[in-house]
Image (tube, rainbow, N blue to C red):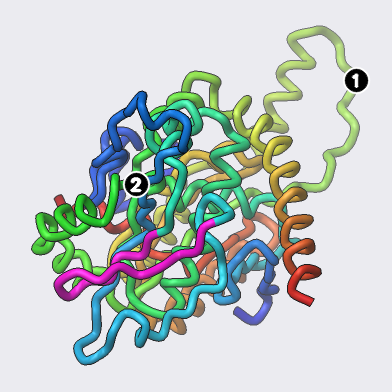
Amino acid sequence: MQSRFASGPGFTCAPVSAKTGPFGPQMAIPSRNPESAATPRKALYLYGVSRLQRGKSANGTPVALQTVGVDGIHPVRPVTSDGFICWVSVVDAADFANALSRNLENLEWLALHSVRHQEVVGEIAAATTVVPARFGTVFSGEAALLRNIQERKTALEKVFQKITAADEWGVKVFAERQPAPAAMAEVKSGSDYLRQKAARLKKRPERNDAELQQLATQLARVARASAPTGKVSGAQADLLWQATFLLPRTRRRQWEQLLQKFVQRWEGVRRIEVNGPWPPYSFVSDAD
Amino acid sequence: MARGRPIHLSLMPTEFESVEIGGAPQEDVSILDILDHVLNAGVVVQGSLVISVAGVDLVYLGLNVVLTSVETALRSLNAEAKRAKQ
């Protein structure tokens, strides 16, 4: 499915499950302890890591979080470690560690918690550079978290360099709905009907044609990096092409002018939808 | 983006904007977009299995229903939270 939409230089089509990232899922799952079954075990949910600015405590960062954590209950707080700030909140280990894989298959659970995850990471990213952790990254406690951050220090530094002063943007191109065609000419037979039907369908704009590739190439030139978009919205009606870009903030004007050029060129034929700025979710995976 | 119309959803951080150029915005797409970006880092092995096993079209249809209810639930939660603050 994904490969249908990805085109142009710089695009690779990797299945979601094959990707890796700086923070693996369920890295330090608290082990089940039958004796403590009565009291729910707690875990630390990691949203992302930012840099600790010299001379400032974590509380001195410009981030004052308004939203609650991914569980909708516990507040998000900073844990500092050797130059980094880890943004965490307490979660129930039963939901986020032991039953995470089952919960991920529950679309309602997944949607609700993804939105909360985005609210927190988005709020941090609006204030400071953050390497987003993968959705569902939990640790048994601060000690396990800090140990893990220590081990990933070099990789994290590299990612910070890549994403500094840049945002993630999604771009989608849709086929414009054409006005309903005139009624079919008299249908003489079944195959005649199918022929007429096929002739109509052919008039629709095509996926991955030369003009779409042109847009992809030119956007990639303005952006710092590009990635295929996730496949959740890939089946939207009339979607012709979509991709995700890492755009330096200094190039937003150039980016908008480029998009505007294609909007004018495609007036009435194709429609462009842009979403963002997102935290750089799709550009932190090459840190391992 | 001169022709674009920014949308500010209550579910989004204030900095977030979604701009549709040359057409009417579709608000119900926003949670799909959130899932696309949030889950693009690849952790959701099981979740993506659901999507590919069921077939993207089917899951998209299912998601629309589920997500609409989630969005409604979140809106009422937000409203409650606001009332509580007042």
Image coords of residue A204 (percent x, y): 65, 41
Tag 2's secondary structure? loop
Is A78 a magenta residue? yes
Is A241 situated above or below A120? above
Is B55 situated above or below A225? above
For the residue carrying disc 1, how many other residues have a C-alpha within 10 Å: few (<14), some (14-19), or many (20+)? few
Please report the residue visible at 69 percent of the width from the left and 29 percent of the height from the top. A199
The one of A38 and B32 positioned closer to us in this rendering = A38
The chain identifier of the residue carrying mark 1 reads A
| Measured Cα–Cα span from mark 2 to mark 1 | 61 Å
Which residue has dot 2 on it?
Answer: A137
Image-based side of A259 in relation to A216, left or right: right
For the residue carrying disc 2, how many other residues have a C-alpha within 10 Å: few (<14), some (14-19), or many (20+)? many
The earlier-in-sequence mark between 2 and 1 is 2
Tag 1's secondary structure? loop
Image coords of residue A268 (percent x, y): 70, 59
2 vs 1, front mark: 2
Residue A263 tag number: none
Q: Looking at the picture, do discs 2 and 1 lie on one chain?
A: yes
Chief secondary structure of the magenta portion: strand
What segment carries the magenta color? A74-88
Image coords of residue A66 (percent x, y): 56, 73
Which residue has dot 1 on it?
Answer: A186
Q: Amino acid at mark 1?
A: Glu
Q: Contact (CB < 8 A) between labels 2 and 1?
A: no
Quarter-of-image position of residue A140:
top left
Please report the residue visible at 62 percent of the width from the left and 41 percent of the height from the top. A236
| Residue A250 is at least partly visible in this image | no
Image-based side of B73 in relation to B56, left or right: right
Image coords of residue A172 (percent x, y): 54, 55
Locate the N terminus of chain B and report the quarter of the image it occupies.
bottom right
